[in-house]
Image (cartoon, rainbow, N blue to C red):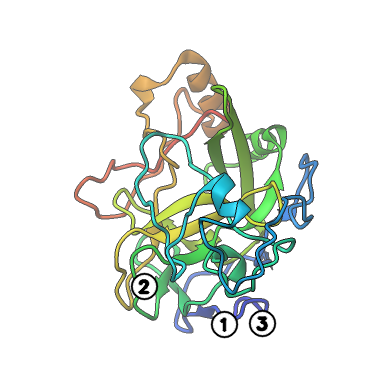
Amino acid sequence: MDLSNSLEEVPVLVESSGLLPFPEFQYSPDNVQGPGCSIDPTEVNVPGCSCQSHSCLPGSCSCLQTYGQAYDTSGKLLNLIRTDSYSSPVFECNALCGCSDACSNRAVQRGLRLKLEVFSTKNKGWGVRTLEMIPNGTFVCEYAGEVISFAEARRRQLAQKSMDHNYIIAVREHAGSGSTTETFVDPAAVGNVGRFINHSCQPNLIMLPVRVHSVVPRLALFAIRNIHVQEELTFDYSGGYHNQTPEALSSSQRDAASQVSGTDGPLRKKCHCGAKNCAQSLPLDLSILS
């Protein structure tokens, strides 16, 4: 069974022996415009370079000179180190660039190229594992879904019941002059294989915002170490934010959490990642509700 219905270059397999009920959703390899999002993620609105070479060079490419070189000559991510709680954006060459589709500054836009399988885990619901070895720095897949506004993300979180899964990811980036920009992606109803990837307190993937054709970033997942065949893929749901304990929350955050949990404090879901540094509960980002 190909979960992507041939929308990906490589079929996304689903474990045939999985006993869990499979969620209903619309598969989309790319982000789609959701409620409150004023920009169509498929619209080409990022300027391109005038390079006519097979692959762009830092000394002559306006894209690389403006945004920096994110990948090596084989298309693997160069900088895997995060220095703070905000993401550093990556810009790829795009549809307006003169370079070829084989340019090393085009990785995420090529889409899924790895053999992945959605499988039923022991105590974490569905998960994703790789059927081939993944080298460090390799682009694995996007976390694609509906791009929504802050207000819509807040509305959806408040509407969730205690047994519901929260798929909404909030990515914050430096925007210059001390300001930040936020992107909210929800793959609950429309999404790709990334929606099945579980959290880990010691993950093997990192999420970075990558801009290709649009100013709306793609949430791309890269390997931060060599990943072995049959190994489960994981990333840190906190996105760099601390996994706050109830005692560390402000009164406004406690009030927001009680709206979701229906209790006097935030509803914490147990983490089953099994890492030595496990926080024992899944990350809780209440900034959307505050």
Residue 1 vs 56, above or below: the answer is below
Give 156 or 103, whichever is nearer the viewer: 103
Q: Is residue 278 left or right of residue 111?
A: left
Mark 1 nearby-residue class (10 Å; few <14, some 14–19, many ≥20): some
Q: Secondary structure at mark 3?
A: loop
- Front tag of 2 and 3: 2
Q: Where is residue 77 shown, x and y percent of the image?
A: 42, 59
Spatial separation of the CA atoms under disc 1 and disc 3: 6 Å
> Could you tell me the amino acid type at mark 2?
Ile
Label 2 sits on residue? 134
> Could you tell me the amino acid type at mark 3?
Ser
**Which quadrant of the figure has residue 55?**
bottom right
Spatial separation of the CA atoms under disc 2 and disc 3: 22 Å
Residue at 67%, 64% in the rendered image = 25
Q: Secondary structure at mark 1?
A: loop
Residue at 36%, 67% in the rendered image = 232
Q: Verify CB contact (< 8 Å) between mark 1 and mark 3.
A: yes
Residue at 51%, 27% in the rendered image = 257
Label 3 sits on residue? 6
Q: Earlier in the sequence, mark 1 or mark 3?
A: 3
Label 1 sits on residue? 11
